[in-house]
Amino acid sequence: MQSLLAIAMLTWRAAFRFRLFVVVAALLLGAVIGLPILLKDDGTVRGFTQILLTYTLGVITALLGLSTLWLACGILARDIEDCQMQMVVVKPVSRWQIWLGKWLGIVSLNAALLVLSGACVFGLLQWRASKLPADQQRVLRNEVLVSRGSARPVSRLLDIEAETERRLQERLAASPDAQANLAEVRRQIFETVKADHQIVPAGAYRWWKVDLGSAARTLNGRPLHLRVKFNAAQSSPSGTFQGAWQVGVLDTPQLWQSGPRSLAPDTFHEIEVPPDLIGPDGVMTIVFLNLSETALLFPIEDGVEVLYRQGGFVLNYLRALLVLFCWMAVLASLGLAASSFLSFPVASLVSVALLVLTFSSSTMALVVSEGSVLGSDGSTKGMGSSVIDAMAVPVFKALLSVIELAKDYSPIDAVSTGRSVSWGTVGRAFLNIVVVLGGSLALGGMFLFSRREMATAQANQ
């Protein structure tokens, strides 16, 4: 442990020697202080606070991520290129201890910078909130500066699958030729049935049942929030569409009606509903009546959701920072693993390329789902494209399995909308990001560093 701490302290000294700590700290503080001046919001306190949290935490993550990669790539590769590592490896310390000590130094440096910037963001939020009128403070405490759990409607995927299978058998009985392209036919039928379960025609209504489970027993007397999002088939002159909501237990006094409301499409809306609208079985029914002249579509994934209070903002904010810290830890592992066998410029290029590839996972997922890089319509198919698909699709599948292991843990959107970042999420993020992904990179980096010939690097100077 003494050797690890000594190497970690050398890493801190190198960060101060490079002026990295001072420069990054100044950039982080400048972003936290300057962004509130530059940001444009929707004019509401809630909107401004949400945007402030989103952008400040996003900038903090970006700055810390890039500086982590730069330091991790340079702290090892530069020591080898400048012939300083040769003086360290002859001492009674293993190479894996050198690698791990540098990782601990970078991670502890990130922890200090993250605590500093995170504390500034928290202090800024509390200071601005204290200057607001009492009614605006109540909005913030209930909708943004809070930890809220969520409950979604009972899944209809089983009904959709059953209806898809029934229609597929009818199609095959009427047209046996569809058997030749069975997967595509089934996908088209599935999307059609799914749309039927999402669309609310003009003048019609649709209902959802939300099971709040054990949380229902703790929500007596507490207001809830209905979070909705829809898409419109056509635009309207006003840009909004009218609808009415009913929430509670149907055919009982526990039923709340909203009256006509105008809402904009393609954006999330939160509607506060009174407390005590949950049935004895923990189920709450939500009914929407479409009063507009065009059909509206509520996505199954995030069209309707019920938000309820679980705890305060302070602990939720701390858990979000812990998840961001897990990301910094795996980026340190990535940079050190690359610099274990590559020069500083090449290691930096490879690390940044892998980071960009991570943010391109949606494109890779589309390629994997279609089974082709150039499209699934067949117009561009040929011998060349078949070879490319045969090589690229399996590689993309493997990369997606690694990326999806960690990409699901992004707490910024949750904490900026008052959503709960649970301890379970933190634990899974630590296990998947730090232990599995970061540990794999660390083992590979330690192995490559232990096999690297230092004398060859020295002779090439």
Image (cartoon, grey):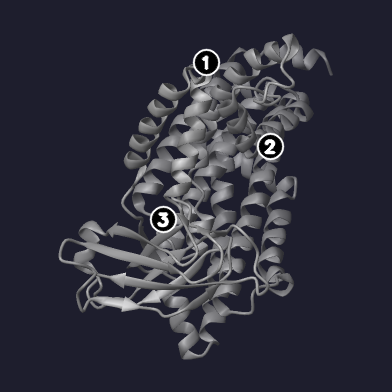
Q: Amino acid at mark 2?
A: Val
Q: Position of residue 452 (x, y in %)?
A: 65, 14
Q: Amino acid at mark 1?
A: Ala
Residue 421: mark in rendering: 3
Where, quadrant-wise, is the N terminus in this rendering? top left
Camera-nearest label, 3 or 1: 1
User: Disc 3 versus disc 2: distance between alpha carbons?
Assistant: 26 Å
- Quarter-of-image position of residue 206: bottom left
Q: Residues within 10 Å of mark 2 (few under 14, many from 20)?
A: few
Q: Position of residue 342 (x, y in %)?
A: 72, 22
Residue receiving disc 2: 356
Query: 77 or 307: which is nearer to us?
Result: 307
Query: 391 or 366: which is nearer to us?
Result: 366
Classify residue 264 as left or right of residue 425: right
Q: Is residue 269 visible?
A: yes
Residue 180: mark in rendering: 1
Classify residue 181 as left or right of residue 421: right
